[in-house]
Every structure is written in structure tokens, then in C-alpha cells.
Amino acid sequence: MWMAIDLENEEEWVARFEEAFCLKIFRNEEELVAAGYTRDKISRMDTKELFWYVSSEPLEEYMSSQAEDLRVLWRGYNTGMGVDSSGEVVNDMCSGINAVFGNGEDKSEVVYSVIHSRSLEGEPGYRLLSNVSKHSGCDPVAALEMRPEYIKSILKPLGMLQHPIVFITDGQSFEVLQRLLTDPDIGPLIRLVPEEASWIGGDMTLGLMSNVFIGNPASTFSGFIAKSRVAMGFGHNYLFMSKDGKGGYRPSCGDVCIFNSKVMGVMS
């Protein structure tokens, strides 16, 4: 299962993972050497180096590779079995959807939007989004502040101001939620994920399955949701928006931009 380690069936879990991604997991250097890999042939990269890695593949090939990996991940989504890397029992990845829309509803019939609000620790967030803005043409503050006018300029033309809006967040900027709740058009539509059901896997799934996703391109979490939606063939991903000169906003960069290292740098 994805987002969890099944300790009771660890060998089976490892075998499935290796087959799905065409790789081999070694738990330590001794296993590598025993498998015939000499120490001088072992290339080492720590977590930080992996985070900063940027693929040299042509964009089209990189997108295709990323999309396939994401589809493989989601085919093995977790249903509440196993533990995370800290040994804590994980939740069902559908927990957010079940909590917001109920276990009894036919959730395939539910129409909703998701807003992912990520403040990115205040001032650093503005710097990050400003940098993305320089390469994508998106507004340098709109996706951070998520003001009602910005949200309505996206949802109203789609007819989505008649349907629920699920708000997921890092919880660092209460002002964003407060503005949306007090807006007469948006406030009544806002649905929050109960604390007991809110976790990274559940929030991801809510974003993936939404009819419209509004996120922050400077957030790797928004980016992962957007990439997953592209991989699944879902449209209506709104991360890169610029002012249209008429009081509204328009897309400044297509879905391809979330994969483009020239726009996103290491976040691609």
C-alpha cells in the first residue's frame, strides 16, 4: 500500500513495490555487496540531494515518466492498513472524502472544488511564489492570499459556486479561511475536514478527486496534487493564474508548467 508500510506482510509489500517500479530495495550496504555490487561502484545520495535533483530528460519524456509513476502509486492507495515511517498507524486515504461527504453517499456523484491554502511560513512563501511568478507569469500573491475575488473569478465561470468548496490547509494563515467564510457567496459553500480525518493522504485524495482544484504553485503539496490530476487526465487545475486586466484572472501557464524545471526548479 502507498503511504504506509505493512509490517505484518513486509516481504510481500517489498516485492510488490519492486515489481511496480522495476527496482530493487537493499536495506544496507552489506546486502549490496553480497549482491555483487562493489563499494566503488555504489553511488550515494542522501535525502537532501534527492530533493535537489533535477532530471535532465526532455520535458515530454519526463512528464510521461512522472505520470506513469503517479498512476502506479495511486493504484496502490492505502485503505487504512500499516504504519508510517514513524511507526504510527495510518488512516484510510479516503478518510477525508468520507468525513466531508459521508460514507453513505454515492461519492462518484458528488461535485465539489478544493482550495489548498499554503502560507509557506509567511515571508518565505511570498519569495517562493514571486520566483515561480517570474518564470510562469502567474500573479505573485494571489495563490498565497486566496482572496474571495480570486476564488470567484475561477469558480463562477465554471458554474461551481453552486457546489461545495472543501478547504484544506497547513493551518498557518487563519486569515485566508476567515475571509472566505465571511464572503456571502463562498462562505456558505465552505466545508472543512474534521481534525480526526485530516492527514496528508486524506487531503491529497480530496484534492485529486475534486472537480476543480485551486492550489499554490510554490507548494510541493499543491504541485503533487496537480501532477497526480494531470496523470489521471483530470482538468481544471488552477495554480498559475494572472490578472486579466478586467478585474478577474486567467491561466498564465498550462498544466505542463508544474513539470517544467525552467518554471518550477527542483519542485518539478
Image (tube, helix red, strand yellow):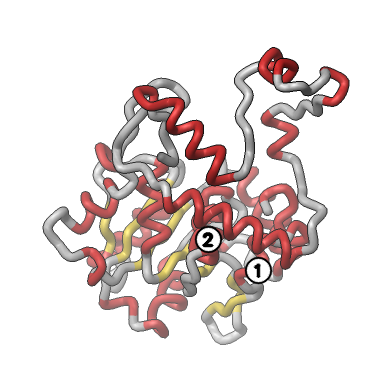
Disc 2 from disc 1: Cα separation: 10 Å
Residue 98: mark = none
Q: Secondary structure at mark 2?
A: helix
Residue 192: give x, y in percent of width and height. 28, 52
Q: Is residue 201 left or right of residue 193?
A: right
Q: Residue furthest left?
A: 104
Image point 55% across, 57% down: which residue? 216
On screen, residue 165 above or below 53: below
Q: Amino acid at mark 1?
A: Val
Q: Secondary structure at mark 1?
A: helix
Q: Quadrant of the C terminus?
A: bottom right
On screen, residue 198 above or below 14: below
In this view, the residue in front, 164 or 44, is 44
What residue is shown with label 2? 226
Binning the other alpha carbons within 10 Å of mark 2 as few (below 14), some (14 to 19) or many (20 upward) gives many
Residue 251: give x, y in percent of width and height. 59, 76
Q: Residue furthest right?
A: 40
